[in-house]
Image (cartoon, rainbow, N blue to C red):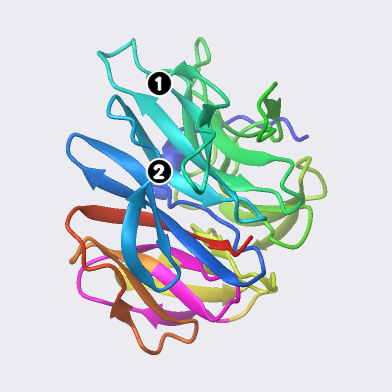
């Protein structure tokens, strides 16, 4: 573990964090997503070709967001926060089976002072990783990478801070994230890094990219980038390729388990869109009322 001082400004400098996934290889199974229907949001699933949507959380006093499928396609991790007045809301990491059973809150903290962000799974399914921001007396709040077992238990700190937008590899024991240098310029002193699951052996990959998903073969990242479009870039380095550029903002991209497709949220339609991984054949997949976003695509169990 590398002890690091964090600047909260690093978070705002890169704008709102995208949801991070890893597309675990296999046959295409269910698609899960967050559906915003006032006054809350819940986790829904649908088949790999779209169609009927099903609410699997059904918690009117708790909002669930940022779903992420487990490697075996049976469990979904998510963020949760309870409704209530300031200072009395709780939040943390939760899990639910893709059939709606077994909903459980793995961690719980004060939602105003102990913040959680974007869960992602390790390839062996033994760890859920996420970012956590906690207050520190006399300094800015650190944002650190933590992990927890999908069965619950103790939370474990992975990095010492300044590490954002964590994404675990679908093939091995690696993490990709944006590292912000301590006390540096939040607009300049940042870089995309790769480490092992314990946060050691860091390798610099290049300039900061708010990666959203890792292809199932482990070779490419997909991310929302310049022009409010969807882009892919080789993990080993190289030129990015634009694969989606619909009207308004495209965000939250995710690969299919077979690697043939990418899905994402389109802000103009508030629906989930799909295209082949080369960008061809883009179309609206859902055409449903409500705001659907943050899709994650599970492998068929």
Residue 235 placement: quadrant: bottom right
Question: Upstream in the sequence, badge 1 or badge 2?
Answer: 2
- Specify whether 119 is left or right of 10: right
Where residue 29 sits: x, y (%)?
54, 65
Q: Which residues are magenta?
A: 239-263
- Given residues 149 and 249, the one toward you in this image is 149
Q: Residue visible at 49% across and 57% down? A: 210
Q: Which mark is residue 290?
A: none
**Relative to 3, is 210 above or below?**
below
Q: Which residue is mark 2?
A: 56
Q: Which mark is residue 111?
A: 1
Neighbourhood count class around disc 2 (C-alpha, 10 Å): few under 14, some 14–19, many 20 upward: some
Q: Would residue 30 be counted in the magenta stretch?
A: no
Where residue 26 sits: x, y (%)?
66, 70
- Given residues 288 and 272, the one toward you in this image is 288
- Specify whether 158 is left or right of 225: right
């Amino acid at each position: 573990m590398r002890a690091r001082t964090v600047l909260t400004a690093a978070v705002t400098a890169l704008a709102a964090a995208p949801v991070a996934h890893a597309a675990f290889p296999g046959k295409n199974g269910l698609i899960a997503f967050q559906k915003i229907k006032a006054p809350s949001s819940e986790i829904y699933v649908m088949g790999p070709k779209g169609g009927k949507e099903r609410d699997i959380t059904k918690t009117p006093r708790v909002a669930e967001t940022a779903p992420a499928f487990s490697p075996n396609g049976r469990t979904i991790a998510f963020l949760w926060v309870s409704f209530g007045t300031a200072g009395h809301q709780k939040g943390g990491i939760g899990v639910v089976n893709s059939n709606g059973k077994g909903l459980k809150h793995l961690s719980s903290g004060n939602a105003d002072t102990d913040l959680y962000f974007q869960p992602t799974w390790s390839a062996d399914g033994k760890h859920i990783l996420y970012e956590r921001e906690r207050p520190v007396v006399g300094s800015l709040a650190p944002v650190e990478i933590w992990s927890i077992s999908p069965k619950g238990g103790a939370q474990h700190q992975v990095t010492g801070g300044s590490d954002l937008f964590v994404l675990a590899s679908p093939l091995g024991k690696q993490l990709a994230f944006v590292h912000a240098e301590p006390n540096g310029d939040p607009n300049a002193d940042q870089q995309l890094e790769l480490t092992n699951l314990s946060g050691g052996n860091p390798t610099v990959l290049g300039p900061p990219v708010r990666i959203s998903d890792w292809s199932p073969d482990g070779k490419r990242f997909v991310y929302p980038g310049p022009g409010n479009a969807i882009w892919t870039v080789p993990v080993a380095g190289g030129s990015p390729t634009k694969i989606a550029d619909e009207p308004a903002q495209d965000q939250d991209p995710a690969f299919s388990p077979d690697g043939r497709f990418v899905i994402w949220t389109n802000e103009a339609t508030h629906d989930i869109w799909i295209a082949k991984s080369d960008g061809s054949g883009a179309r609206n997949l859902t055409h449903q009322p409500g705001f659907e976003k943050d899709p994650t695509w599970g492998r068929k169990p």
